[in-house]
Image (cartoon, rainbow, N blue to C red):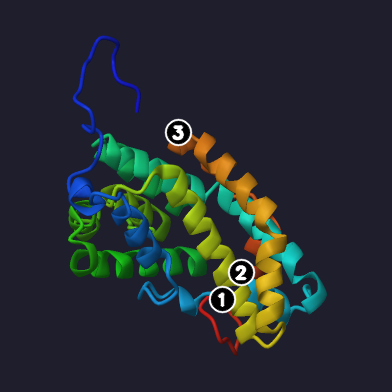
Amino acid sequence: MDRPAGTDRPAGADRPAGADRLAGADGLGPLLAQLQLTDSAFPSGLYTLSHGLEGHFQLRAVQADNVADLVRDLVRAAGTADAAALALAHRAVTGDDWDALVETDRRLHAIKLNREQRTASVRTGRQVLDTAGPAFDSAPAARLSRLVATGAAPGNHAVVVGAVHAGLGVPVRDAVAGDLYAFAASCATAAVRLGRIDFRRAQALLREVRPELVAAADTALAVRDPRDLHASAPAADAVAALHERAEARLFVT
């Protein structure tokens, strides 16, 4: 956040409380904390989500040979929505602007057009909040938990992760890139669990979508106003609407 001209602040004043405690002499603390937060073993509940892949496979709209194209589309869409909200939330916590964080959270919730997507985003976000306290002793997570408990903020996953990353001292660029990679990896894992690709193909897929991850991160980091958050995957929204009424489902989304 820009500061008024002539306002002097000591070095490190924009670092959230707790960040210096984690950094350590070698500066590896924030990186290690980020790896923990984005690891698939972190109990966020993301393993219950296919991010739309299951619905596309059910409709035979996607096959094994073009699943990477779908993941590319989903990553691009994240650049103007969840990834951008993560960046905004990170900057809001770093700048101690909690009104901006609440506005970002509400806006992200509003642009999720399907009940399935909204429910999954909030559920996984709140699971991260519940775990971030004991895992990281996160002051931003504790404050956001209070806002969620009072109904002031819905607690979407991307906003929660952005807030926690900021409290850990993880740079916003790294936070966005790491979460986008975790999203793509979750998509690839879902395709494996659905029996459409094997583990080797999943790793190749992650290499293939890397340019889209870079582009989506750039898009997300360029967003400076919550009002610029928007959905950009109408086909995926339509598939999600059908998936939430499917009789048999392995995944929540």
Residue occupied by mark 2: 240
Q: What is the spatial separation of the Cα atoms under label 2 and label 3, in whole angstroms?
A: 27 Å
Residue 154: percent from left, percent from top? 33, 57
Residue at 22 percent across and 43 percent down: it is 16
Mark sitting earlier along the chain (1/3): 3
Q: What is the spatial separation of the Cα atoms under label 2 and label 1, in whole angstroms?
A: 6 Å
Asked which quadrant contains residue 181, the reply is: bottom right
Q: Residues within 10 Å of mark 2 (few under 14, many from 20)?
A: many
* Tag 2 and tag 1, C-beta contact below 8 Å: yes
Residue occupied by mark 3: 225
Residue type beneath disc 3: Asp
Residue at 32 percent across and 39 percent down: it is 92
Residue type beneath disc 2: Ala
Residue 241: percent from left, percent from top? 61, 69
Please name which of the two marks, 1 or 3, marks the residue nearer to the observer: 3
Q: Identify which residue, 87 or 241, lies in the foreground.
A: 87
Residue at 23 percent across and 68 percent down: it is 135
Residue farthest toward the top in the current orientation of the protein: 6
202 versus 215 height, above or below = below
For residue 151, the mark is none
* Tag 2 and tag 3, C-beta contact below 8 Å: no
22 versus 94 height, above or below = below
Asked which quadrant contains residue 204, the reply is: bottom right
Residue occupied by mark 1: 244
Q: What is the spatial separation of the Cα atoms under label 1 and label 3, in whole angstroms?
A: 31 Å
* Tag 1 and tag 3, C-beta contact below 8 Å: no
Residue type beneath disc 1: Glu
